[in-house]
Image (cartoon, coloured by chain):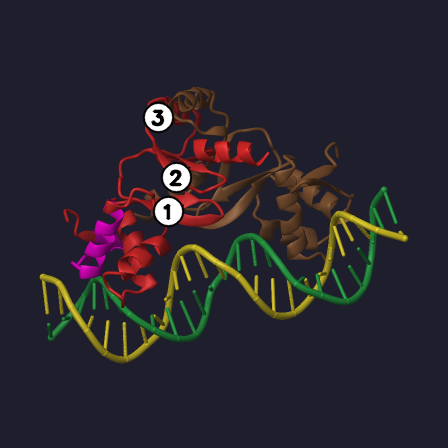
Chain colours: A red, B brown, C yellow, D green
Amino acid sequence: MIINLKIVGDDMKQIKNSRQRDMILQALKLSCTHPTADELYQTIKLQDAHISLATIYRNLNLMDELGIIRKIPMGSAPDRYDPNAKKHAHISCRNCGKVCDLELSSIDAVEKELMTLTDFCAITYDVVFTGLCAQCQKNQKKES
Amino acid sequence: MIINLKIVGDDMKQIKNSRQRDMILQALKLSCTHPTADELYQTIKLQDAHISLATIYRNLNLMDELGIIRKIPMGSAPDRYDPNAKKHAHISCRNCGKVCDLELSSIDAVEKELMTLTDFCAITYDVVFTGLCAQCQKNQKKES
DNA sequence: TTATATGCAAATGGTTTGCAAACAA
DNA sequence: TTGTTTGCAAACCATTTGCATATAA
């Protein structure tokens, strides 16, 4: 791991390796569904029956702060996590909850416009679109 | 109020007027801070000491579903509410929590790009940028 | 008269935290 | 040795829900 220091208040905190953190990062990297903390917990429990959900949360939060992974806030649904820390948007299905990655080149223009409109600085964003995925569209047609 | 029907499952639900709902909508319209449910509760309690927080939540959710107001999901912080139901983005200060409205014309292009990239339909979005507001930037300089 | 809305209190559920023991460096 | 991480259980807290009562139409 490249980053091994975390700034807490005025001083640095050393980050030590941990078997659990490695497992969590590996499981997240192998996933392709932007899993929730609990979904990761269920998966990892198969390898290590004694791991705690609190450990999952602590490490996901830590790695999010360090910029190794990204937390995707999902409104009222549980947060999801993305092994790809590169800035990108997401779209989630309001019916089945599935989350897909979006590479939107036009979003750069939005960031630029934003700069001219506001006196905020150090701007980041979480863009989560919501819609109905192709699969759920089909299913809805069948039902009616 | 224009809309007075709500679709629940297969049938319509009549919406009845209520003194409480009127108070909540009025308080929200008079606000300019995108208040949380609890902030509205504190304000409205001054007029009606017996109003319940559950009533605030029920009515805010109802009016959000009816498109009269908008709920702004704030990630880990409590949801905020906006009397302006027109589609627009927000930026919030990561330090003091303040939320400001943003009219971003360039966001239309993002929606268009999105249409060409995905097979999702019925797309809505909640765009919440996060940054440091001018006031908090000043305060941070003073401290250091 | 009948369905909808309310107030209250209790439940929910994702997430965080306190603490003593385990572990990394 | 020293500070960080873990597992467990309990706490947290925004939000929702069950239920009897009040209210709108």
Sequence-first disc among 2 and 1: 1
Label 2 sits on what residue type? Val
Q: Please report the residue visible at 56 percent of the width from the left and 48 percent of the height from the top.
A: B36
Q: CA distance from mark 2 to mark 1?
A: 9 Å
Magenta stretch contains residue A20: yes
Disc 3 and disc 2 on one polypeptide chain:
yes
Magenta stretch contains residue A25: yes
Q: Quadrant of the N terminus of chain B?
A: top right
Residue A70 image offset from top left, x and y in percent: 31, 44
Disc 2 and disc 1 on one polypeptide chain:
yes
Label 1 sits on what residue type? Arg
Q: Nearer the viewer, mark 3 or mark 2?
A: 2
Q: Residue A99's mark?
A: 2
Residue B87 image offset from top left, x and y in percent: 54, 29
Q: CA distance from mark 3 to mark 2?
A: 15 Å
Residue A53 image offset from top left, x and y in percent: 33, 62
Q: Chain of mark 3?
A: A
Q: Residue A104's mark?
A: 3
Q: Please report the residue visible at 41 percent of the width from the left and 40 percent of the height from the top.
A: A98
Residue B95 image offset from top left, x and y in percent: 41, 46
Determine if residue A38 is in view. yes
Q: Are marks 1 and 3 in contact (CB under 8 Å)?
A: no
Label 3 sits on what residue type? Leu
Along the line of sight, the residue nearer the viewer: A3 or B3: B3
Q: Quadrant of residue A68?
A: top left
Q: Please report the residue visible at 31 percent of the width from the left and 65 percent of the height from the top.
A: A52
Q: Which residue is mark 1?
A: A80
Magenta stretch, residue numbers: A6-29
